[in-house]
Image (spheres, rainbow, N blue to C red):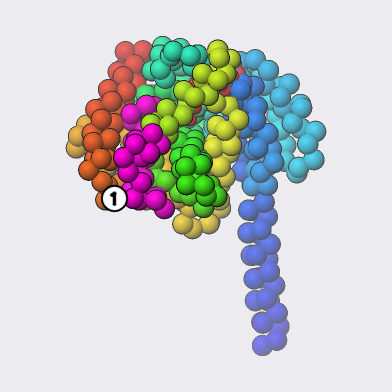
Amino acid sequence: ADLGQQREILKGTQRRLYSVANTLGSSKVTVLGAAGGIGQPLSLLMKLNPRVSQLALYDIRGGPGVAADLSHINTNNTVTGYDPTPSGLREALNGSEIVLIPAGVPRKPGMTRDDLFNTNASIVRDLAKAAAEACPDANILVISNPVNSTVPIVAEVFKSKGVYNPKRLFGVTTLDVVRASRFISQVKKTDPTNEGVPVVGGHSGVTIVPLLSQSNHPSIDGPPRDELVNRIQFGGDEVVKAKDGAGSATLSMAFAGARFAESLLKAAQGVKGVIEPTFVDSPLYKEQGVDFFASRVELGPNGVEKIYEVGEVSPYEENLLEAAISDLKKNINKGIEFVKNNP
Ligand code: NAD
Ligand code: LMR
């Protein structure tokens, strides 16, 4: 009996060790656009993440340089930079669990995110084609704008290759959530880490719908509420204006992207109850013709575990949602049409 008990104890220890080894660095993460304003700090944060075992950096210029630089940091994972060739891209993607895509041009003052469509749509389409072939089961995290259109573009490409899994495609809207909690904490003079504001809809202007009625400060009303909602919806413009032609948010975006990737890695490695708002293939507004929608999503080993309903909203937020739906529909269709006409 003693021997049997010892064997069981040993087995348990083995299982625990295995699960720890699994948690610490078992995932390959790829960054496409890794040498850019977002790509570099995002890659740095991924290099510091103990759940990442391999970091693959690809860009049309500068990938190997950023990789060489990061590879000297004494964390126990490997960083490889790839040449801007089809085989370089393929190798960067092979076996990847998470593909972060911040490739594409950023806004300049006076531009909307939709003004980026003509340049970024084909960049995202081509990168999606490569991912659909090299790592069809990976989680694809789209950062490139306009997110409301680039996410449907990735979906269409994956569909055309017969490998679309709606549970593995995410538009990264975490920055809106990060901003919302920071901005409300400035108004209410609180600690932003204790603030949580669900932000639903999409990722541009009026499609960004903060639900203050579901925050810690549901009674905020009148001009302070309008001002706060406007600041959350147009927070990106604040940065574009301040950078004055040199681009848009990069550091706060890298922080937000790294947070989302960490949530996904955590959930994939078995942590339960990980919830992040994100723009996904969603049933919530399909009847109104909106195939993708951001709301709170529980993440799991298969990607999307559960999509939460928007829940109870105020009449004011009902109006915000209506405006969002109308714009979202146009943005999403634009992405779908683009792939149909430019496969
Ligand atoms: P950036 O110009 O500094 O960097 C973009 C990088 O992409 C460059 O290094 C460029 O060489 C690379 N690139 C271009 N085409 C490529 C291709 N085909 N394959 C691989 N790499 C390619 O821009 P940035 O400030 O890092 O912004 C990148 C994108 O992210 C923009 O579209 C911006 O609007 C968007 N963005 C999204 C959010 C969000 O919340 N989702 C926030 C901020 C910025
Ligand atoms: C943001 O929200 O900061 C990004 O989408 C970049 C932009 O163009 O504003």
What residue is pinned by disc 1? 311
Q: Is residue 195 left or right of residue 338?
A: right
Residue that extends furthest to the bottom in the rendered view of this protein: 1
In the rendered view, would you say 31 is above or below 11? above
Residue 95 x, y percent position in the rendering: 58, 36
Q: Residue at x 72, y 41 (%)?
A: 77
Residue 107 x, y percent position in the rendering: 49, 16
Choose between 126 and 62: the one closer to the eye: 62
Residue 311 visible (yes or no): yes
Q: Quadrant of residue 331?
A: top left
Range of residues picked out in magenta: 200-228
- From the image, which quarter does the N terminus lie in? bottom right
Residue 4 x, y percent position in the rendering: 66, 82
- Dot 1 amino acid type: Gly
Q: Residue at x 64, y 38 (%)?
A: 46
Residue 45 x, y percent position in the rendering: 65, 37
Choose between 123 and 84: the one closer to the eye: 123
